[in-house]
Amino acid sequence: MEHGSFSDHSKSSFSLSDEDHTLANSLRFTLNQDPRVTFCGYSIPHPSDNRVNIRIQTTGEPAKDIMKDGCQDLMLMCKHVRQTFDQAVVDFKKNKPVQDINID
């Protein structure tokens, strides 16, 4: 859910349900790498509440567009990490045959 101003679309807060520090901190990091972002931070209103509030302020572009771009960038980074990990596992299994363990 987006909470923003009708007159200034460059500043918005987003409330994400069923999320925690894992997504929020990763998304905050990704958004802060974007040169269009002047501020990005997050808060969790209460430890027992599975909700994250993310605040974005931009250089002028709509915050919701930058939020969408940040989510897509994060998904691409996660995909790259997963592919790299999967390839490393395949390479490891090729180069290191599993030895039989003799238990007497």
Image: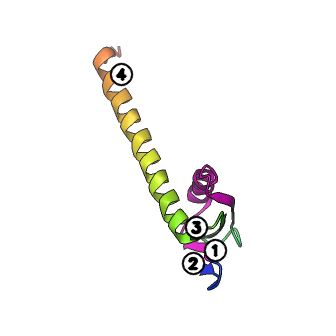
Please rate how many residues cluster around mark 4, counting C-alpha atoms within 10 Å: few if below 14, some from 14 to 19, many from 20: few
Query: Where the N terminus falls, by quadrant?
Result: bottom right
- Per the rendered image, the range of residues in magenta is 9-38
Q: Which percent across, then down, holds residue 93?
A: 31, 22
Residue 8 makes an appearance in the image: yes
Q: CA distance from mark 1 to mark 3?
A: 11 Å
Q: Which residue is mark 4?
A: 92
Question: Which residue is disc 3 drawn over?
Answer: 61
Picture coordinates of residue 79, whole percent (x, y): 40, 46
What is the secondary structure assignment of the residue under circle 2? strand
Q: Nearer the viewer, residue 95 or 7?
A: 7
Amino acid type, callout 2: Glu
Going from N to C along the chain, the mark reached first, 3 or 4, is 3
Q: Earlier in the sequence, mark 2 or mark 3?
A: 2
**On the image, numbered disc 1 is attached to which residue?**
12
Q: Specify which label sits upstream in the sequence, 4 or 1.
A: 1
CA separation, marks 1 and 2?
7 Å
Label 1's element?
A: strand
What percent of the width, then of the height, locates residue 14? 60, 73
Q: Which residue is mark 2?
A: 2
Q: Residues within 10 Å of mark 2 (few under 14, many from 20)?
A: some
Specify the quadrant of the image occupied by residue 37: bottom right
At 32% from the left and 15% from the top, the residue drawn is 95
Residue 17 visible within the image: no
